[in-house]
């Protein structure tokens, strides 16, 4: 249930209303907009009559929400959320490109790629230290050493770093990481999501391989329910009957999410297709669809990459793509 308050009302009246709501064993989510304050009721609202709330003089309107996610719901937070990543604002017209290799392989490799993508205009550096792989014999990442090397690349370039967590027991290793990524396989690892809800770092939440948009938003709700509202959604393709591409990019998820949630949404065309030749056209499509950013895999030598070389761009390809993306972002009225 959502209560929209009238404009220019005394804060004491708002405080009294919130206390009365909490006395009914309900929690509240308060969103202060430019023109109205919105109070979202969280919990069992079945015994509360909208007309009783409507009769309160400071209340403008009352609406019931049928969706199970509340904090992530745009009805409870009409204005787009802006996520602060090391001083860079994600959302509300600011477009970001997160680029880098699938996995960190060496200090020389990650610093070289970091400098290349920064020169082309990337705003954040990605790189896997912990790698979830289908085969137990595939390269699993450098773990803590990989994070250390990412931090060295950050020192060399100033780019905020984004890397994936696989286990809550590793959280201490992520103290200096700017954005913690939750991969597709862990989207419904609810114990991990609960732990991430207790930290204040931005969380990049990837959509699961075969999950609905509502299930994805419910996973975001787990993080937000713990107190961490700094969630960025990432569409990275879903598993369908199609075998030509690695996954099927659900580009329709962008406008759907813009309607349903206030959280920023970025697109990962690299994992969506598994083919480097398809990354550029889908990246351009994501800009036109209204995405808040892109996540693109870039490797200085894709043919020799230890992980996902087939879907990685080389620095020259990335530079050419970024020149086009910048023009499209500007045309859409956004800034990088």
Image (cartoon, rainbow, N blue to C red):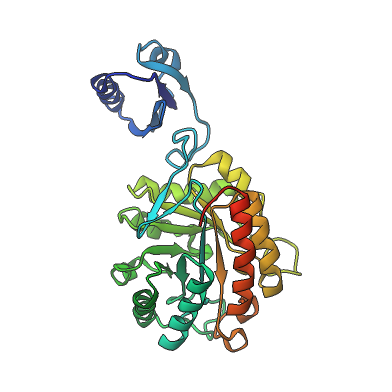
Nearer-the-camera pick, 65 or 271: 271
Q: Is residue 100 above or below residue 139?
A: above
Residue 301 visible in rendering: yes
Measuring 41% from the left and 86% from the top, which residue is drawn there?
Answer: 107
Please name the residue shown 45% across and 50% down the image: 220
Where residue 312 sits, quadrant-wise, is bottom right
**Front residue of 85 and 64:** 85
Task: State the image coordinates of residue 96 (x, y, percent, origin top left).
Answer: 50, 59
What residue is rendered at 30% in x and 54% in y?
198
Task: Using the rendered image of the protein, determine whether residue 308 is visible from the camera's viewpoint.
Answer: no
Residue 193: % across, % down: 40, 56
Q: Nearer the viewer, residue 39 or 11?
A: 11
Left or right of residue 112: residue 278: right
Q: Is residue 288 above or below residue 125?
A: above
User: Residue lying furthest left in this view?
Assistant: 12
Q: How many marks?
A: 0
Q: Is residue 258 left or right of residue 229?
A: right
Q: On the rendered image, what quadrant is the N terminus found in?
A: top left
Is residue 196 depicted above or below 130 in this figure?
above
Question: Percent x, y for residue 235?
Answer: 58, 57
Q: Position of residue 275 (x, y in %)?
A: 68, 73
Closest to the observer: 54 or 125? 125
């Amino acid at each position: 249930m959502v209560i929209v308050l009238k404009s220019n009302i005394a804060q004491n009246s708002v405080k009294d209303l919130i206390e009365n709501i909490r006395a009914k064993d309900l929690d509240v989510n308060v969103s202060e907009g430019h023109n109205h304050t919105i109070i979202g009721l969280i919990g069992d609202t079945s015994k509360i009559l909208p007309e009783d709330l409507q009769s309160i003089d400071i209340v403008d309107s009352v609406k019931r929400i049928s969706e199970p996610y509340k904090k992530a719901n745009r009805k409870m937070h009409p204005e787009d959320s802006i996520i602060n990543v090391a001083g860079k604002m994600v959302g509300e017209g600011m477009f970001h490109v997160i680029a880098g290799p699938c996995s960190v392989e060496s200090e020389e490799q990650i610093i070289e790629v970091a400098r290349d993508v920064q020169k082309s205009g990337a705003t954040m550096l990605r790189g896997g230290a912990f790698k979830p792989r289908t085969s137990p014999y595939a390269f699993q990442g450098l773990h803590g050493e990989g994070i250390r090397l990412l931090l060295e690349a950050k020192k060399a370039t100033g780019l905020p770093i984004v890397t994936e967590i696989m286990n809550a027991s590793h959280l201490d290793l992520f103290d200096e990481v700017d954005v913690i990524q939750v991969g597709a396989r862990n989207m419904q690892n609810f114990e991990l999501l609960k732990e991430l809800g207790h930290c204040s770092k931005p969380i990049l939440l990837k959509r699961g391989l075969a999950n609905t948009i509502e299930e994805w938003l419910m996973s975001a709700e787990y993080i937000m329910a713990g107190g961490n509202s700094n969630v960025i959604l990432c569409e990275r393709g879903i598993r369908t009957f199609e075998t030509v591409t690695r996954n099927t990019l659900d580009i329709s998820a962008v406008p759907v999410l813009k309607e349903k949630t206030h959280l920023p949404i970025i697109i990962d065309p690299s994992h969506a297709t598994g083919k480097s030749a398809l990354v550029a056209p889908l990246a351009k499509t994501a800009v036109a669809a209204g995405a808040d950013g892109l996540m693109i895999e870039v490797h200085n030598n894709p043919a020799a990459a230890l992980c996902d070389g087939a879907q990685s761009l080389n620095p020259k390809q990335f530079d050419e793509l970024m020149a086009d993306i910048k023009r499209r972002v500007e045309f859409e009225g956004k800034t990088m």
